[in-house]
Image (spheres, rainbow, N blue to C red):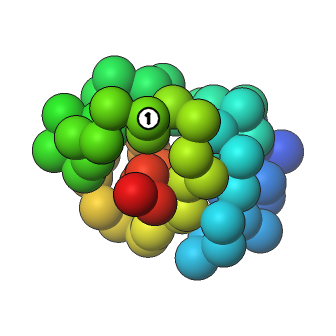
Amino acid sequence: MSRSLKTLGDQMLGKLVPKATAQAAGCGGDSWTEWLCTHPDYYSRECYVVANCTAHCGPWEYCCAC
């Protein structure tokens, strides 16, 4: 992961961010929806950044705020 993406992730930590912003920081969609969120509308919801949730996205995980 590039330094710029790591900085972006650090800045977003603990904050609500749009899904696209989370993806831009290196996290894909399906890897975190299976166990964090089952709401059918989750793709249209905000996502928030949680430190060390899982190894899927490096140091960050983007959890859906249902």
Q: Is residue 52 left or right of residue 25?
A: left
**Which quadrant is the C terminus positioned in?**
bottom left
Would residue 59 be found to the left or right of residue 19 on screen?
left
Q: Is residue 12 above or below residue 6?
A: below
Residue 34: image quadrant is top left
In the depicted structure, whether residue 2 falls above or below residue 18:
above
Q: Residue placed farthest to the left in the image?
A: 35
Packing grade of label 1 (10 A; few <14, some 14-19, many >=20) is: few
Q: Name the amino acid type tagged 1.
A: Asp
Pick whichever, 38 or 59, lies toward us. Answer: 38
Farthest-out residue, bottom: 14
Q: Nearer the viewer, residue 61 or 55?
A: 61
What residue is rendered at 45% in x and 68% in y? Answer: 50
* Residue found 83% across the figure and 45% down from its top: 4
Q: Residue furthest right?
A: 4
Residue corresponding to mark 1: 41
Q: Quadrant of residue 42?
A: top left
Q: Quadrant of residue 31?
A: top left
Examine the rendering and report whether any part of residue 3 can be seen: no
Side of 24 relative to 32 (left or right): right
Measured along the vertical axis of the image, is residue 25 above or below residue 28? below
Instruction: Look at the image and tell me whether residue 8 can be seen.
Output: yes
As drawn, 28 above or below 41? above
| Residue 23, horizontal then vertical, whole percent | 63, 31
Q: Residue at x 66, y 72 (%)?
A: 15
Residue 30 location, x and y as percent? 34, 23
In the rendered image, the quadrant that contains the N terminus is top right
| Image mark count | 1
Q: Position of residue 57 (x, y in %)?
A: 43, 40
Query: Is residue 55 rendered to the left or right of residue 14?
Result: left
Element carrying mark 1: loop
